[in-house]
Amino acid sequence: MLGSVAAATYLYRKDDTQKEHSILRNFPLIGRLRYLTEQVGPELRQYLFDNNNEGTPFSRKQFEDVVKSGKYKSRVIGFGSERNFDEAGYYIRNSMFPKLREELRLDNSQKIDTKVYGDMKEGLLTRKEILKNNQAEPYFLRQEDAVIIGENTCQKPFKLKGLVGQSAMSYGALGKNAITALSKGLGLAGGTWMNTGEGGITKYHLAGNVDIIMQIGPGLFGVKTPDGKFSWEEFKKKSDIEQVKAFEIKLAQGAKIRGGHVEGQKVTMEVAKIRMVEPGKTINSPNRFYEFTNFSELFDFVQKMRDVSGKPIGIKIVVGDLEALEEMAKTMRDTGEGPDFITVDGGEGGTGATYQELADAVGLPIMSALPLVDEILKKYGVRNRIKLIASGKLISPDKVAIALAMGADLVNIARGFMISIGCIMAEKCHTNHCPAGVATTDSKLQEGLVIEEKQYRVANYVISLREGLFNLAAAAGIDTPIKFERKHIIHKDNYGRVSSVCDINLALEKR
């Protein structure tokens, strides 16, 4: 008791005399309870107080859906949906005569050897599950339905038998175990791709023999000279890697309309060597490329990259400046040049690190941005030359299907894949203290992420998404998800009024 009294007295005097916190000066000891509650508040809300449909960036329900798809390759629920049907939202228009399974245009001829959890025994404080071998149907598109990027422009077009792949996540933002687990899982699932992010290509990206889209950002990591200029020699070396199927020029990202940002504590010796920067020093890429300043110069650069590599070249954009979007499409029409694909990233997209004002206020969300790009490209007669890849919180089959119907040819997912390898949404990606070992380069924390187990969760998640897409296609009366169009989507507002998406005018109003 004397010890407790002495400790309390010491803390009281310390709090009463310190000058940093007014709450502690006015309420010694008791004020500490406020700071304790503030510290553990996010965890209390996530696990105890938020209901299943509350919480951002993703609700508990959305988080659990991804986890269950990865662990059990299952999306089966009981009793009923937890969606709030009073809120406004998009719905898939079902057919009175849906397709039978045997009518679906899918390829399940080649099974995938994966592993899923089963025989769960759960107590109040214990949980025991057994990882079992599983032969999974891949739910590939048929050969004739595969999406081909650069079919008429490249020596080596990129052919895809799945519509979902991994969005850009670089080594440095994520640790080596996370990148390796993603690579191996995606490689196991097949028919998909992995975007390297702007941090350059590494042995961890190549570990799973997965098809790769190498992203190039304004920092030019992996393709620059020692004095910081674009290196065509280094670019050619990367294009000679068989696994690299395409390149993406990152003009912008939904969560940060600027170059990349990595805090210094994440920049290890290896990360620094790959990016040709100083270890331990915060990395800020330029806001834009020095190599071009307008669409004509950009498209000339794209064409040279295509000539040197023989592979498809795309650009990643965020939609906000609609006049510039029209100018881009017009330039494509007038010059006959342009990218092979455009990745449209919604303003709600994620990141390893950004500034609050950029994440909250700059760039349109994906369900507004995507149809605008689709419409404007059609208006100028160039849509048939371009594949559109959509990204921005599209982590479940229904979200993917709606994006496909709104104009996307393919869909990118980042945070869904992070959750599949153990992310618990701690929102500490920028600090290097990710407790799950995902968004950290700390060697000790990375030990918690076991590649040999997490790779199967990645594969199961991809396969589950593809299966869900075929389920939704059948319900809509179409035999393959590549046939989703706006006519298959309806929108219900807060008052219960229903509108066909085809009737909503999204075109830029004349001023």
Image (cartoon, helix red, strand yellow):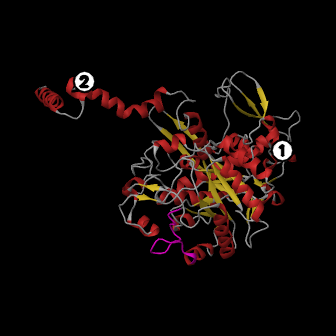
Quadrant for the C terminus in the image: top right
Q: Position of residue 55 (x, y in %)?
A: 52, 32
| In this rendering, position of residue 314 left or right of residue 46 | right
Q: Residue at x 51, y 69 (%)?
A: 222
Assign a secondary structure to mark 1.
Answer: helix
Q: Residue at x 81, y 38 (%)?
A: 502
Q: What residue does disc 1 label?
A: 101
Q: Where residue 182 sits in the image (x, y, percent)?
A: 56, 57
Q: Residue furthest bottom?
A: 233
State the residue in front, 113 or 272.
Answer: 272
Nearest the camera: 97 or 245? 245
Q: Residue 12: x and y, percent?
A: 16, 27
Q: Are marks 2 and 1 in contact (CB under 8 Å)?
A: no
Asked whether residue 31 is in view, the answer is: yes
User: Which image quarter is the N terminus in?
Assistant: top left
Q: Amino acid at mark 1?
A: Arg
Give the mark nearest the N terminus, 2 or 1. Answer: 2
Q: Between tags 2 and 1, which lies in front?
A: 2
Vertical placement of 413 versus 15: above or below? below
Q: Secondary structure of the magenta portion, mostly? A: loop
Q: In front here: 84 or 184?
A: 84
Q: Amino acid at mark 2?
A: Ile
Up-down relation of residue 63 to residue 335 (above or below)? above
Give the extent of the magenta segment. Answer: 218-232
What crowding class fits label 2: few (fewer than 14 Cα within 10 Å), some (14-19), or many (20 or more)?
A: few
Q: Is residue 476 magenta?
A: no
Let me know if residue 225 is in the magenta part.
yes
Which of the numbered marks, if any, corresponds to residue 30? 2
**Whole-Å distance between the Cαs marked 2 and 1?**
64 Å
Crowding around mark 1 (Cα neighbors within 10 Å: few <14, some 14 to 19, many 20+) is few
